[in-house]
Amino acid sequence: MTLLIFEQFLNGLQIGLLLFLLAAGLTLVFGIMDMVNLAHGSLYMMGAYFAAVFVQWTDSFVLGAILALPAGMLLGVATEYVALRSLYARDHLDQVLATFGLILFFNELARLIFGAGGMAIELPALLAGQIEILPGLPYPTYRFAIIAAGLLCAGFLFLLVQKTRLGMLIRAGASNREMVGALGVDIKLLFTLVFGLGSALAALAGLMAGPISTVQIGMGDNVLILCFVVIVIGGLGSIRGAFVAAVLVGVLETMGRAFLPNILGSFLNPSEAGTLAQALSSMLVYILMAGVLVLRPAGLFPAPGR
Amino acid sequence: MSVPASLRSSVSTAVALLLLAALALVPLAAEVFEDPFLLTLFTRIVILALAAVSLNLILGYGGLVSFGHAAFIGVGGYSIGILAKHGMYAAWIQWPVALLMSALFSLLIGLLSLRTRGIFFIMITLALSQLVYYLANGAYAYGGDDGLTILKRTDFGGLINLSHRPSFYYLCWALLVLSLFLTHRLVNSRFGMVLRGAKSNDRRMAAIGFPVLRYRLTAFVIAGTVCGLAGALLATHTDFISPAMIHWTRSGDMIVMVVLGGMGSLFGPLFGAVSFLALEEILSSYTEYWKLVFGPLLVLVVLFARGGIDGALGRGHGGILLGIIGGFFLLHGVHLVYGDDWAIPGALLLGCVALVGLVHWLRRHAKSGDKP
């Protein structure tokens, strides 16, 4: 039982880390540019599609992944340059609407280019097996690799934001945009850089999620809503908050999905318990968010200066 | 080129009244052209226009960007569906329950979400509507995520037969007209003034001594209840309920309708719903990839045409609007003559033109020295 709980915790951690990769980019865009970007989920989807296509072309998972990252980043920068740049000064409603339009566009574009059926990403033999992380607990190598990669990225982001000059500018931009601009920093370039970074992280999340679930149209839409939940719980613009909230959300949802059917199954028949448990575990996350908003309206770790 | 305010609203009112009159003739047209699909399409349009009118009350007049309005469509629809499943078809049970339930849900959602503002309000309404969505997903007794077919429509006794499609259409039409009239009365009353005042400066309204939260909550509940009515009508129209009614993209569609038509104007949501759904219908007859055009179109509307259709009418841009509509139907005609070979290149061309226009606009914007 303890092993089972530990295994489910790892699954939750893995989902949470994927969420974190997405939410980190989103929360930076939110925090610095005060911009609601619904199209972030589309960048995740496109990243997964790029990976699927490149892996098929090159016949190598690593090469495909290496190619998909800059492709996702380029797409993000292009989107920022063409469509989002003129939206920063607008109110949130305009941003919601325009990026909603972008979701429609990207979903349809993916359907046109890649077809309506999903695509699968083949895993290399090295990652396809299982390893024994604890005596008596085999765990899929690939999921373990996701956890490792996610933690690595989180560490990298932490160092970037806390220890480098770019990170200092990002933090400064989050607390006072005008002031940073007045001090002679090219704020437009900074925005584009941050957006590119966020897109690359989204593409990374997409390509890592690809082999677990199929790559399909609209895969970004539901994840996007979860990411919003994550950044609202964590506090807008806070990477640390996004990390804690993402892991919390991932673990909560996975635990609910794993153990609620058994609990409900003791007084319902299996199929009914399954339906109800799935709905309940999805609801848990939103209930958590509503609770956090009522008790701490600015989130768990509000970014300073807002 | 400024049009006097009195004339501005009268142009929009005249167009809206013409549109409503034209809508009243739809069952006749469906009969004459022997096209039953026309009636189905327009029933849907009228019902969603009613939902958009309700959203406009809080979004347009109240300035509250609710990204979860589809929840109330779901609550209204599910009330009808669940009662029908248990064999209760009588109108005086179904309709009051549907209205009460949507009022109750909007009261709860409003109480929680109105404590927050700005971006958090958008997020929490979204999250709460997702809760309702998953609630419907988990309602295994009522179909879960497969949905539930309504076997028999609401029974109004001998009063009106909802299974007779033109009668049902006229009921929806009458409710739409009624909702427009009530909105007009409401927003021009003292209550509406307070609501609109809170939109432009809620702190000042509070300082003057108005309990802003209470006013907003009332507006939220009214909007939710009317939207629940639209949901009940929608469930009756399709004889089907499913969680898809509550999906968050539906909420997004409704915001699009309101903004496309013109926020905070009486007839805006009517224009918006009609043009949104007509556009959807026509574009999707060209190509299944219609959203490839519709998405950028939406971005363009947000960037260029603030104030939507109603605003364009008011600024005296009726000619441009007519030109756009004319061009659209010209293209539609080309499509009908040449068939589907043109569909995909045509859609791509339109998308490219939209993108080029966007970039061009951005360049001009940059030249005229936009300040950060």
Image (cartoon, coloured by chain):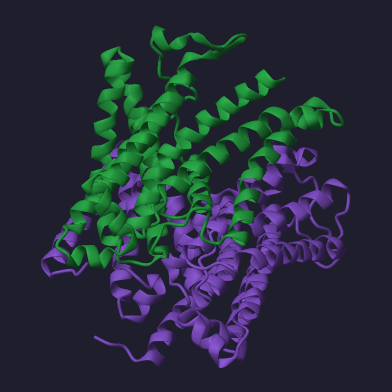
Chain colours: A green, B purple
Q: Is residue B38 left or right of residue A179?
A: right
Q: As rendered, which of A173 and B197 lies closer to the eye?
A: A173
Q: As rendered, which of A144 and B48 lies closer to the eye?
A: A144
Q: As rendered, which of A41 and B255 lies closer to the eye?
A: A41
Q: Residue at left 28%, top 30%?
A: A69
Quarter of the image holding residue B185?
bottom right
Q: Residue at left 37%, top 76%?
A: B311
Q: Is residue A80 left or right of residue A107?
A: left
Q: Residue at left 58%, top 53%?
A: B127
Q: With respect to residue A172, does A80 lie above or below?
A: above
Q: With respect to residue B244, does B24 lie above or below?
A: below
Quarter of the image holding residue B45?
bottom right
The answer to whether any part of residue A29 appears in the image is yes
Q: With respect to residue A277, does A185 lie above or below?
A: below
Q: With respect to residue B53, does A67 lie above or below?
A: above
**Quick one: quadrant of the C terminus of chain A?**
bottom left
Residue A274 is situated, as x and y percent measured from the top left of the image, at 73, 30
Residue B213 is situated, as x and y percent measured from the top left of the image, at 62, 77
Task: Return the residue found at the far front.
Answer: A163
Q: As rendered, which of B230 and A159 lies closer to the eye?
A: A159
Quarter of the image holding residue B346?
top left
